[in-house]
Image (cartoon, helix red, strand yellow):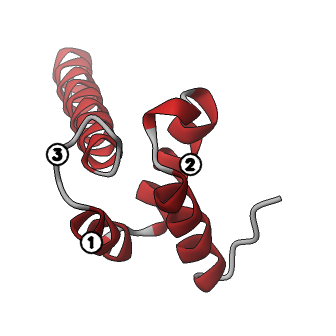
Amino acid sequence: MSQTRIMETTERDATRAVKEVHADAGRERMRAYRVSKECNDSIDEKFSMIKSYDVGDLLYVLRDIEENPGKYDESVIKGVVGRLYDMGIMCI
């Protein structure tokens, strides 16, 4: 394989990886929004969303809660921490 083809393949793979990272970040931000006070969903709907989240999503929401605690209802915060605990992750 020529040096040019290797560089083209590497560049294409890097571009694809960057797009995937941006897509994941957007998905995580949407997940945090869906359980925040900004979203008009009911508390029951927010709890259903929390139950459907995987560990990565919950940790992203927890990080956003730490940065902006006023954006979240106390019951949602307890729900996120409780769900992580159920998954074997203790929050201190």
Taking the spot 41% from the left edge, 56% from the top edge, the residue there is: 57
Report crowding for label 1: few under 14, some 14 to 19, many 20 or more residues within 10 A (C-alpha): few
Could you tell me the amino acid type at mark 3?
Asn
- Number of the front mark, 2 or 3: 3
Could you tell me the amino acid type at mark 1?
Asp
Which of disc 2 and disc 1 is earlier in sequence?
1
Left or right: 77 as drawn, with respect to 9: right
Q: Position of residue 67 (x, y in %)?
A: 59, 28
Report crowding for label 3: few under 14, some 14 to 19, many 20 or more residues within 10 A (C-alpha): few
- Number of the front mark, 1 or 2: 1
Which of disc 3 and disc 2 is earlier in sequence?
3
User: Which residue carries the number 1 mark?
Assistant: 44
Report crowding for label 2: few under 14, some 14 to 19, many 20 or more residues within 10 A (C-alpha): some
Element assignment for label 3: loop
- Front one among 23 and 51: 51
Please identify the quarter of the rendering in which residue 86 is found.
bottom right
Q: Position of residue 68 (x, y in %)?
A: 54, 28
- Front one among 57 and 77: 77
Please identify the quarter of the rendering in which residue 21 is found.
top left
User: Which residue carries the number 2 mark?
Assistant: 62
Could you tell me the amino acid type at mark 2?
Leu
- Front one among 48 and 11: 48
Element assignment for label 2: helix
Taking the spot 40% from the left edge, 69% from the top edge, the residue there is: 54
Whole-Å distance between the Cαs marked 1 and 2? 19 Å
Instruction: Indicate whether 34 appears above or below 64.
Output: below
Whole-Å distance between the Cαs marked 3 and 1? 11 Å
- Front one among 15 and 29: 29
User: Which residue carries the number 3 mark?
Assistant: 40
Element assignment for label 1: helix
Q: Position of residue 36 (x, y in %)?
A: 35, 43
Taking the spot 34% from the left edge, 70% from the top edge, the residue there is: 47
